[in-house]
Image (cartoon, grey):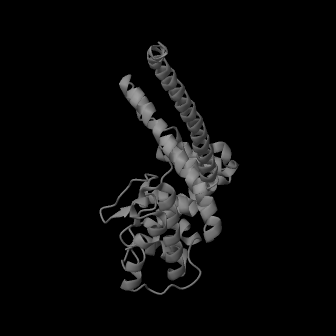
């Protein structure tokens, strides 16, 4: 009888044993998983602190995050049919060559306004060029109105101008001749960046004047007429335009449609005081071309 009772209770005992075993195993696994998750979390925090402590890693992370957010934003805008918002780039303004006229002093602002009206261009980009011309002129020992007058005669303040012989940009620099001067700006395509073209043009102008020994002959070098009988009136036009600009900065009233036909007194006033030796063909090619 007793043996029969034991046989009847055996299945129940087995079930209880299995339940106890399963419970113990479950509790053990839960404890292990808790400890493992804590360890993984601790390692993740340590890795994050180490990574964020390095500027290069932090920079890459920020760029990747911004790109991901921008991609997500564009995808949502495209899905909604808003094509213009999908290609929006708020930081594009940082690439614009422009300056508020309030950033200029009275002389500079008056000149920028006059140039804008005379050449039918926006005053803000001209304002940036005027500021740059003043800064470069001070460093190079050149009158900023001379720099601006050359831009006016060469390109009419069109940063994308190109001559039939390949002179490019605001200052109409021969890019293929002076490609080495654009290396520090990333390459010859920088010729169409207004500020870069202005800086390279001033460097070329300074070299021309120094090699020629005077302003007028230096301008002939610059325009590529040093070996020719005539410069086609180039020097006279530049000097006359400079005179107009000087008058504007001095507070005189100068009509925006004033003639740019040079007259003898303008050339006489700016005549070089030192004798100038004729340039050689090699020197000519080494400059403007």
Q: Is residue 9 above or below residue 196?
A: above
Seen at 58% across and 45% down, the residue is 44
Residue 254 visible (yes or no): no
Residue 87's x, y, as percent? 41, 35
Q: Is residue 237 left or right of residue 176?
A: right
**Of all residues shown, which one is farthest toward the front?**
1
**Of all residues shown, which one is farthest toward the right?**
105
Q: Is residue 106 left or right of residue 176?
A: right
Is 92 or 129 nearer to us in this picture?
Answer: 92
Residue 107's x, y, as percent? 67, 51
Residue 206's x, y, as percent? 54, 73
Residue 232's x, y, as percent? 38, 67
Residue 232 visible (yes or no): yes
Q: Is residue 11 above or below residue 176?
A: above
Q: Is residue 278 above or below residue 220?
A: below
| Quadrant in which the C terminus is drawn | bottom left
Seen at 37% across and 64% down, the residue is 167
Is 160 or 27 nearer to us in this picture?
Answer: 27
Q: Quadrant of residue 30?
A: top right
Q: Is residue 229 left or right of residue 27?
A: left
Seen at 53% across and 67% down, the residue is 202
For the image, the number of numbered tags is: 0
Q: Quadrant of residue 275?
A: bottom right
Is 160 or 77 nearer to us in this picture?
Answer: 77
């Amino acid at each position: 009888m007793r043996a029969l009772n034991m046989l009847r209770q055996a299945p129940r005992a087995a079930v209880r044993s299995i339940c106890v075993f399963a419970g113990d195993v479950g509790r053990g696994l839960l404890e292990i998983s808790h400890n493992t998750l804590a360890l993984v979390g601790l390692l993740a925090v340590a890795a994050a602190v180490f990574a964020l402590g390095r500027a290069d890693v932090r920079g890459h992370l920020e760029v990747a995050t911004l790109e991901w957010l921008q991609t997500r934003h564009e995808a949502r805008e495209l899905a909604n049919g808003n094509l213009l918002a999908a290609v929006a780039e708020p930081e594009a303004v940082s690439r614009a060559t422009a300056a508020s006229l309030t950033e200029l002093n009275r002389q500079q602002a008056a000149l920028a306004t006059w140039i804008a009206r005379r050449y039918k261009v926006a005053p803000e980009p001209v304002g940036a060029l005027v500021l740059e011309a003043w800064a470069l002129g001070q460093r190079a020992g050149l009158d900023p109105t001379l720099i601006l007058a050359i831009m006016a005669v060469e390109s009419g303040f069109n940063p994308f101008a190109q001559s039939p012989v390949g002179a490019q940009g605001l200052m109409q620099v021969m890019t293929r001749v002076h490609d080495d001067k654009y290396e520090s700006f990333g390459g010859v395509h920088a010729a169409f960046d207004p500020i870069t073209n202005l800086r390279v043009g001033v460097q070329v102008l300074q070299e021309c004047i120094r090699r020629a020994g005077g302003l007028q002959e230096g301008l002939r070098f610059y325009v590529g007429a040093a070996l020719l009988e005539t410069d086609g009136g180039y020097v006279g036009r530049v000097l006359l335009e400079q005179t107009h600009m000087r008058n504007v900065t001095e507070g005189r009233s100068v009509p925006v449609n004033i003639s740019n036909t040079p007259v003898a007194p303008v050339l006489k006033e700016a005549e070089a005081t030192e004798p100038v030796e004729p340039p050689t063909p090699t020197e000519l090619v080494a400059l403007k071309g």
